[in-house]
Amino acid sequence: MSALLEVSGVSVSFDGFKAINNLTFQIGAAEMRAVIGPNGAGKTTFMDIITGKTKPDEGHVLWGEKSISLLSMSESRIAQEGIGRKFQRPTIFEDQTVADNLMLALKKNRSPLAVLRFRPREEDHAKVADLAEQIGLTAALHRKSGELSHGQKQWLELGMLLAQDPRLLLVDEPAAGMTPAEREHTTEILVEAAKTRAVVVVEHDMEFVRRLNCKVTVLHEGSVLAEGSLDHVTANEKVIEVYLGR
Ligand SMILES: Nc1ncnc2c1ncn2[C@@H]1O[C@H](COP(=O)(O)OP(=O)(O)OP(=O)(O)O)[C@@H](O)[C@H]1O
């Protein structure tokens, strides 16, 4: 399987402190990956590098079939390439309905004039209905988004990201603050999404990671400490020492 994203030998320092240290990482075009690691391991910085927010001091970040470098691209250019990121805090339009939020997020020509002239067509309504189904919000389509529960808001934001049809979706702690039932539904959305795209989930909750049932990358001090199935990495002595705290 050829990689969709290939990170190699990447390092970045902040005031002399190496937050990412010779990091190597690959993900395929339709793959789910969990990234775990103790606080300060470099998980956020790793995602910042992929999305162009932070530029590394050295290394390569190659993207797609043509292995183009993401390093010289702006954040918005990288987003256009098909890399979507979900932060912990949802950024939905609370005064708008679920349907409106999804409609606004559809992949469209985003020039100001095009946005003003945008009149949804039948296919756009169908896409919105499809997305609502994927995130389990069909019954809430016409509710104001501000009235949704915490979990529902997170799903709506996932739906808005999926509306852009990213090839790689980066998700930061999707299960934080959710009830067990909400976590289960979140797992389903992500597992489904990873059938047709790459999904990287940064998560502290081991039960959640177990249910994702995917390869796990353990970061420590800015490098990959271990990689493999959850059982494989949690049996690793170094991982037990630094992460599981024994
Ligand atoms: N802009 C910055 N300036 C200085 N130091 C930074 C900066 N960004 C991150 N760091 C440091 O780099 C290290 C890695 O941070 P990062 O936030 O990537 O870790 P993390 O694995 O996401 O941690 P957490 O699980 O707590 O979110 C930390 O020691 C952090 O203090």
Image: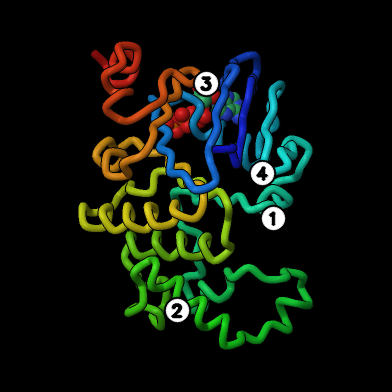
Q: Which amino acid, by three-letter code, is at mark 2?
A: Ala
Marks 2 and 4: CB-CB under 8 Å? no
| Residue to which mark 3 is pinned | 222
User: Earlier along the polypeptide chain: callout 2 or callout 4?
Assistant: 4
- What label does residue 64 carry, if any? 4
Q: Quadrant of the N terminus?
A: top right
Residue 224 pos. (x, y %): 48, 21
Residue occupied by mark 2: 129
Q: Amino acid at mark 3?
A: Gly
Residue assigned mark 1 = 80
**Left or right side of 111 for 95:** left
Q: In terms of sequence position, does the residue under pointer 1 or pointer 4 come before the other?
A: 4
Residue at image position (55%, 76%) is 103
Classify mark 3 as within 8 Å of ligand 1 or not, answering yes or no: yes
Kindly indicate the quadrant of the structure image that contains residue 80: bottom right
Q: According to the image, what is the colour scheme of the structure?
A: rainbow
Residue at image coords 68%, 44%: 65
Mark 4 lies within 8 Å of ligand 1 (Cβ measured): no
Q: Position of residue 147 (x, y in %)?
A: 36, 73
Give the spatial CA distance, label 3 vs label 4: 24 Å
